[in-house]
Amino acid sequence: MKTLNNYIKTLLLSVTTLIILSVPKESYAQPGISISFQQFYDELSPYGQWVDDPDYGYIWIPDVEPGFQPYATNGYWVMTDYGNTWVSNYQWGWAPFHYGRWNHHNRYGWYWVPDYEWGPAWVSWRSGGGYYGWAPLTPGVSIGVSINLPVNFWVFVPQRYILNSRINRYYAPRTTIVNVYQHTTIINNTYRHNSRTYITGPRRTEIQRVTRTSVPVRKIATTTRPGTARVSSRSVEIYRPNVTRNTQARPARVNTADNIRPSAGRTNATRGTSGTTSSTRQQTTTPSTRPANTTRTSPARTNTNNKEVTRPATRSNTGSTTRPAATRPASSKRSNIQPQTSVQRPSTPSRSTVQRSSTTNSSRAAAPARNGSARSGRSTRNN
């Protein structure tokens, strides 16, 4: 009988152990409801595009403003019981900044690779020279591993502004990143909870010392719906469900890496800004250069072949009326010399009068001088 009881106990223990081991770790790694990648695919589709990447599978490319950079744009740091936690103002920020990793592609910019584990922020931290810096961890990199992320991945801010809600106002200029980076070292602070290790960044005591202010530690609270986090004086409410594996999950719309629509995809810091600049230049320079060319170019080369275009220009531009007159004597006589012609007509009889009696009237003697100047001016224009 004892043997049977022992056998039953052993069997029950084995079955219980098997059930526990068969449950995915992700289902009890975080509190709250459970989802699969399908919710990532569905919730993020309105804010970007999913691309079938040959290296990482389905990746997400956000439709964002120019200059976007993960963990730098439209968000800020808050100290929580998990360490420095990134609070995003994007509606979709609950997923890409707390699950998975970011990477950058030269052609289509920043993209996100989903993963199962939640974290306060998947970044690497540096400190030194009066600055704190952070950069997004790339796919496949484990925390605690010292790696050399590209320098342009890093964002630096003076230490006293690390918890400022408008931290983006104080970022070090991009032109100084290399110099600041060289004066910093890696921060390897972590926090372990429920067999999970989280990157915390600079400690609260250190931030209090450099900011000379008290730093509250907010508690992470879980909400039941996706959306932006809500920060109060005591807590940060954020959607952080458990993520389980589902091999059937798939985005409704998928692009290939070679077929990304131009309006989204690449980081606007590389494509969007340059595209906006080029279009602006076309709009501002195209209309301004044409009038500039008509006024600056020599009328002697343009008026002979295009009389209709240059004729209004010579009438409206009083400063250049004499230059087109040299190339078009016919139009010049009509527009510019006609007032002088009215003076020349009565001057012809005065010339004969002067020949008859040159000393009769001094006012008449002045007429040949005017007439002579008019004739000399006419001959010059005709030539």
Image (cartoon, helix red, strand yellow):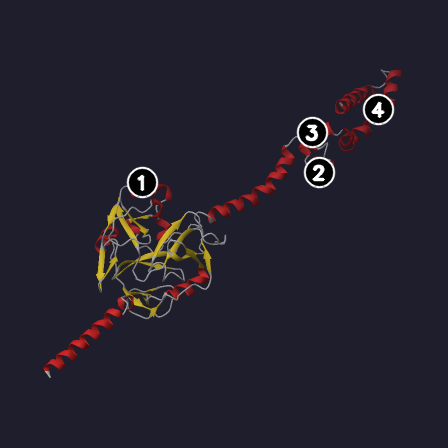
Q: Residues within 10 Å of mark 1 (few under 14, many from 20)?
A: few
Instruction: Establish if 78 lies above or below 363.
Output: below
Residue indicated by mark 1:
179
Q: Which sits earlier in the primary sequence, circle 3 or circle 2?
A: 3
**Distance (Cα) linking label 1 and label 4:** 84 Å
**Distance (Cα) linking label 3 and label 2:** 13 Å
Taking 332 as reference, is 36 left or right?
Answer: left
Instruction: Establish if 243 lies above or below 134.
Output: below
Taking 52 as reference, is 155 left or right?
Answer: left
**Distance (Cα) linking label 1 and label 2:** 57 Å
**Distance (Cα) linking label 3 and label 1:** 57 Å
Residue 76, given in percent of the width and then of the height, sits at 34, 56
- Type of the residue with mark 1: Asn
Q: Residues within 10 Å of mark 3 (few under 14, many from 20)?
A: some
Residue indicated by mark 3:
300
- Type of the residue with mark 3: Ala
- Type of the residue with mark 4: Ser
Residue 121, given in percent of the width and then of the height, sits at 31, 57
- Type of the residue with mark 2: Val
Residue indicated by mark 4:
347
x 65%, y 36%: residue: 294
